[in-house]
Image (tube, rainbow, N blue to C red):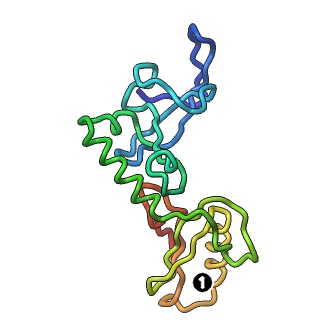
Amino acid sequence: MEAIPGTIIRGMGGDRTAVLVGRCARCNRKVYGWKEENNSADPRGYFGPRNTVTHLVASEMTGEHVGPDVVFCWDCVNEHGSEGYAECVKLAVTFWDRFQDSCDGGGRSFCEHGPAARLETGGGSGLYLCPPCWAHEMEWRKERNRELDPSCMFAIREYPTPRHPMGKELAR
């Protein structure tokens, strides 16, 4: 079922508002939850198992990883018993492996933001940047690319997502 974000559903428990939480990291389906229930929902309810959101949380899964929650549809996490769940955990851990607790600052003197993702800089080295510092770095790269020969330009990348753990390349 394709829900429309902002749709108000009237029920015995009161009115609830549907929210688009994101896309499943495994199958790419849109997943929904209820605004009034911290963006969660019951898969037996309105959205059904293919479009009900569930999250894997780094601190709850391994205790040694940090990073944002990874969004899945309820169906993928529970598909084929433990096999589907194991596949989702593996995908989430691969994503979390690219994070650490602190940010390197992205050209700023210091940064107090939370978990940071690795940005490869070449030759096996890299920076760990939080989303604001990542955006700052990409803006700097865009400016610098205006002066560089096309063969030497910096890659412009989106902040990593479970579907693109290295950060999807947008341009050079």
Query: At 47% from the left edge and 84% from the top edge, which residue is drawn?
Result: 122
| Picture coordinates of residue 137, whole percent (x, y) | 64, 74
Q: Quadrant of residue 163?
A: bottom left
In the rendering, at what x and y percent does residue 131 appear?
63, 62
Which residue is at the far top? 12
The x and y percentages for residue 14 are 62, 12
> Residue most toward the front?
63
Looking at the image, which residue is at 28% across and 35% down? Answer: 79
Query: Does residue 112 appear left or right of residue 73 in this picture?
Result: right
Q: Residues within 10 Å of mark 1 (few under 14, many from 20)?
A: some
- 166 w.r.t. 2: above or below: below
Instruction: Return the residue nearer the eye: 125 or 156.
Output: 125
Tell me the quarter of the picture where residue 139 sits. Answer: bottom right
Q: Give the total of numbered labels.
A: 1
Residue drawn 50% across and 33% down? 32
Q: Quadrant of residue 34?
A: top right
Q: Secondary structure at mark 1?
A: helix
- Across and down, in percent, residue 55 comes to 47, 40
In-front residue for pair 130/146: 130
Q: From this view, report whether residue 131 is shown above or below residue 19.
A: below
Is residue 154 positioned above or below 39 on the image?
below
Give the residue displayed 44% in from the left and 47% down from the top: 61
The residue tagged 1 is: 145
Front in this rendered view, residue 101 or 134: 101
Residue situated in front as seen by the camera: 66 or 107: 66
Quarter occupied by the N terminus: top left
Reply above or below: 168 against 77. below
Q: Which residue type does callout 1 highlight?
A: Asn
